[in-house]
Amino acid sequence: MKKYLFFIYLFLNLSVTAQNTSIPRQEIPPDYGYIVKIGQQMPNIEMTLTDGTKITTADLKGKVVMLQFTASWCGVCRKEMPHIEKEIWQKHKNNDDFVLIGVDLDEPLEKVKKFASDMKISYPLALDPGGEIFYTFAAQGAGVTRNVIIDRSGKIVYMTRLFKKEEFNEMVEVIKILLK
């Protein structure tokens, strides 16, 4: 009987552990405006950060990546960014296996630098003249506030739209799971 109870305990414990370490299955509603899909490899892109550093998709292989699409005129982005700074960037910025880049949609360098300063964010921002990067991930006319999480193998594993606290919290957990 003790052996039987032990196996039940072990099974339940492993089931709970497995649930806590697996990425939630996500269905992306069509109105989110994404043209990329969960499970797809991250598209090949090149980004230039506000400090002039260039980053390519190849540079990100082997890392957990969060791309945060934003713009200074976006009210929802402004609401979300302090949460990204505090709940994600400050917790993971010293982890060499994590990269967070805010991709600013079609604004000039000085405006993007002022935006980062005004928002009191310290994570890097990339320029996206003409929306070339944005429109690699989202459809023409789609709203800007969105996040894309990419695993170490370069696959898209989680995407958000707008700032919904429950979805944001789930994204925070996905990042933690991927960094384990």
Image (spheres, rainbow, N blue to C red):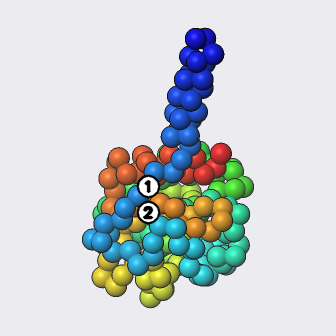
Which residue occupies 37% across, 61% down?
27
**Residue at left 64%, top 76%?**
57
Element at badge 1? loop
Q: Mark 1 points at which residue?
A: 25
31 left or right of 137? Answer: left
Residue 108 badge: none
- Report which quarter residue 101 is drawn in: bottom right
Q: Mark 2 points at which residue?
A: 159
67 vs 26, left or right, is right
Mark closer to the observer (1, 2): 1
Callout 2, which amino acid? Met
The location of residue 94, given as percent across then percent down, is 69, 50
Q: How crowded is mark 1: few (under 14 residues within 10 Å), some or many (20 or more)?
A: few
Q: Which residue lies furthest to the top in this view?
A: 2
Identified at 41% across, 58% down, the residue is 26
Q: Which amino acid type is shown beneath numbered disc 1?
A: Arg
In this orientation, does residue 106 appear?
no
In the image, residue 60 above or below residue 164:
below
Camera-nearest residue between 124 and 51: 124
Q: Is mark 2 on a helix, strand or loop?
A: strand
Q: Against 9, is 145 above or below? A: below
User: Circles 1 and 2: CB distance less than 8 Å?
Assistant: no
Residue 140 position by quadrant = bottom left
- Between the residue at mark 1 and the residue at mark 2, the CA separation in whole angstroms equals 11 Å
